């Protein structure tokens, strides 16, 4: 999947900031890729981009409209379908991260065919995947792992990409979830592949590289989440990481979606990930902890980071607050020399 | 999926014993379910069942023909398709464990519709699955785990079912692979579900039970197989096993399909499985080792079992040679009292 940019971000009539989080992710992490936003009459939100109609966006150079907004349940409403058809007729491709597939809607499929445009259902895995083989491959890879789902793995991975690129190190975010795929313009929704192909899909999105740079692979789930640990383990084996970076949210009371189930301790979680990762990379190390500390005051957050650093002997930062410079430094120290772009 | 018996086993024109291994599994483990075999003119094999045509089998009470034979690549040839259509018209349902789906062949779908018969693609997971939740559920469950793929997990699980039932203990084989599903007449091909649903599918096939009996869950893959460990971990979490039974093949030189990659040690493999399994059942224990010792002489095999018993302090038997009586005894000792059927 190679999704052409630049993008027009479709906000529709959204009024709930959570409903546009995919579009916001794009605007934050790939501003150079976002040429404008489409807002309906009732839309109360903006991402600060120029407001554009479909034809106007196409005229301004947009190649793909991103449908980053959904009804509850991830379905497309009648209005969204009509707008997608209009965008296709205006000459835009359309990409969607919704559960409802663009390719499952006959009206949209017909319009795309007629207009000669492409549809990208980013949750749909490629038809032809190979099973993983675990054979050592060239290149350096880092994988973000978590104590739980939704603890900031995508954000952290992108923050590290930005930090390394700022230091003129070759580094590429490798996407495993729908928002990440739209940001990277490629990738595979790992949790949507057939179970036998989890590690194979991960190998496919982070192939051997020989430029001395890093593949930074977006993690999913947690070895400690009883719903999704299989995905996390296949990802860990397929990623064959040289380095893991643990992501955690302070103050979370239980594993996401399962009241009463506690989160693992950080040291235990790192050790479990390293133990499992050694199957395909015996030299794997942990290089840091990325903490979502938004539930704490800035001062309390600093103290929490310091306490974790003392306990684990690893740099600990909140990427939203202080960035990931110290984690990047630790990574580079551990793996010198690295290619300079 | 509830596949109606009795079965007519379709051998077609098979000449390779490996090609009929699904049918042979049925004849061995569910003889009471197998009413006859269909053999083409060129077929050189027999499972020792009465040879029958389609109409004859239907007349004798068969409800479902099992397509347990495939070309290389798992595809259906033109002759097999013609025979499936003929069987449907004779009043039989048809079940298949092939990669090629019955429901993907318009000719077969039309014939089934016309005849009012059912098609069972046993590799096809159910459309509606829930994600796992890991909440403790009632009932006793044993899961077979392996040092590798294809080390005898299905055979061992079925042998244990037979052994326990012989002792008038309630015990039910829960199938996770295509041959197992045909034997159990229900189940889910775990490696074919979407990655997010591995543990949820396992929870679905082994729901809570309160009769004091055992669910014996067929394992898949290995935590040490870099292609499939995600499946094995999701299965382990979803099974929520009270007991695990390790399966291993003596003399195997490398992990299946990956020359050069060694198998894990037995003690390490048991420990890794117990550690992971504790996430959903902290009380899990190992109750034995089932050894495929077919590469050794009977005397050498006995010695190998004895050596493993001494090392691990667990009963070790080759189910093909000596059955699993001592493993069953250990299981029952550890979990008395059990319901008597």
Image: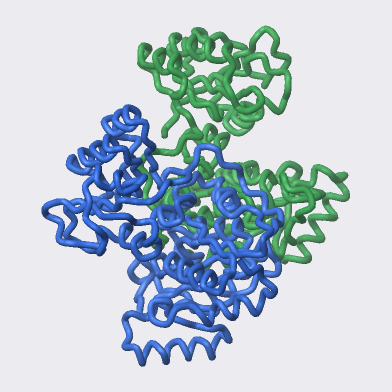
Chain colours: A blue, B green
Q: Is residue B160 left or right of residue A94?
A: right
A81 relative to B272, above or below: above
Q: Quadrant of residue A301?
A: bottom left
At which x and y percent is residue B241?
A: 52, 58
Residue closest to the far front: A59
Taking the spot 47% from the left edge, 41% from the top edge, the residue there is B188
Compared across the picture, whether A30 is left or right of B192 comes to: left
Nearest to the observer: residue A211 or residue B1 = A211
Residue A119: x %, y % from top left: 37, 39
> Of B32 and B262, which appears nearest the observer?
B262
For the question of whether residue B163 can be seen, the reply is: no
Whether residue B107 is visible = yes
Task: Return the x and y of residue A233 as percentages of the image width and height.
Answer: 55, 59
- Quadrant of the image for the C terminus of chain A? bottom right
Question: Between A292 and A272, which is closer to the camera in this rendering?
Answer: A292
- The x, y position of residue B62, in whole percent, is 48, 18
Residue B329: name its quadrant: bottom right
Residue at left 71%, top 57%?
A136
Which residue is pictured at 28% across the width and 47% down the height? A57
| B279 vs A253, nearest the viewer | A253
Q: How many marks?
A: 0
In which quadrant of the rendered view does residue A227 lie? bottom left
A172 is higher (above) or lower (below) than B62: below
Q: Residue at x 42, y 43 (%)?
A: A124
Above-or-below relation of A340 to B122: below
């Amino acid at each position: 999947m190679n999704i052409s940019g630049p993008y027009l971000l479709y906000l529709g009539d959204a009024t709930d900031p959570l409903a546009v989080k995919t579009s916001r992710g794009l605007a934050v992490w790939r501003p150079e890729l976002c040429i404008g936003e489409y807002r309906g009459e009732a839309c109360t939100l903006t991402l600060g981009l120029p407001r554009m109609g479909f034809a106007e966006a196409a005229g301004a150079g947009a190649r793909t409209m991103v449908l980053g907004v959904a009804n509850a349940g991830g379905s497309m409403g009648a209005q969204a379908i009509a707008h997608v058809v209009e965008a296709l007729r205006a000459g835009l491709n359309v990409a969607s991260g919704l559960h409802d597939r663009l390719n499952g809607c006959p009206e949209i499929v017909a319009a795309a065919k007629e207009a000669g445009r492409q549809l990208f259902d980013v949750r749909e895995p490629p038809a032809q995947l190979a099973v993983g083989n675990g054979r050592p491959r060239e290149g350096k890879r880092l994988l973000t792992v978590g104590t739980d789902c939704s603890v900031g793995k995508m954000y952290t991975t992108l923050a590290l990409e930005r930090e390394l690129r700022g230091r003129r190190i070759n580094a590429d975010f490798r996407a495993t979830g729908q928002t990440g795929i739209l940001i990277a313009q490629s990738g595979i929704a790992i949790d949507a592949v057939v179970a036998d192909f989890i590690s194979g899909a991960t190998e496919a999105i982070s192939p051997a590289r020989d430029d001395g740079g890093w593949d930074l692979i977006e993690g999913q789930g947690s070895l400690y989440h009883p719903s999704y640990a299989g995905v996390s383990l296949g990802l860990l084996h397929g990623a064959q990481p040289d380095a893991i970076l643990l992501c955690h949210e302070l103050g979370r009371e239980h594993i996401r979606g399962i009241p009463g189930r506690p989160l693992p301790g950080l040291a235990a979680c790192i050790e479990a990930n390293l133990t499992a990762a050694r199957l395909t990379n015996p030299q794997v190390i942990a290089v840091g902890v990325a903490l979502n500390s938004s539930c704490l005051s800035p001062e309390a957050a600093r103290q929490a980071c310091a306490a974790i650093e003392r306990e684990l002997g690893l740099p600990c930062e909140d990427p939203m607050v202080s960035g990931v410079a110290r984690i990047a430094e630790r990574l580079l120290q551990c793996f010198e020399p690295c290619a300079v772009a």
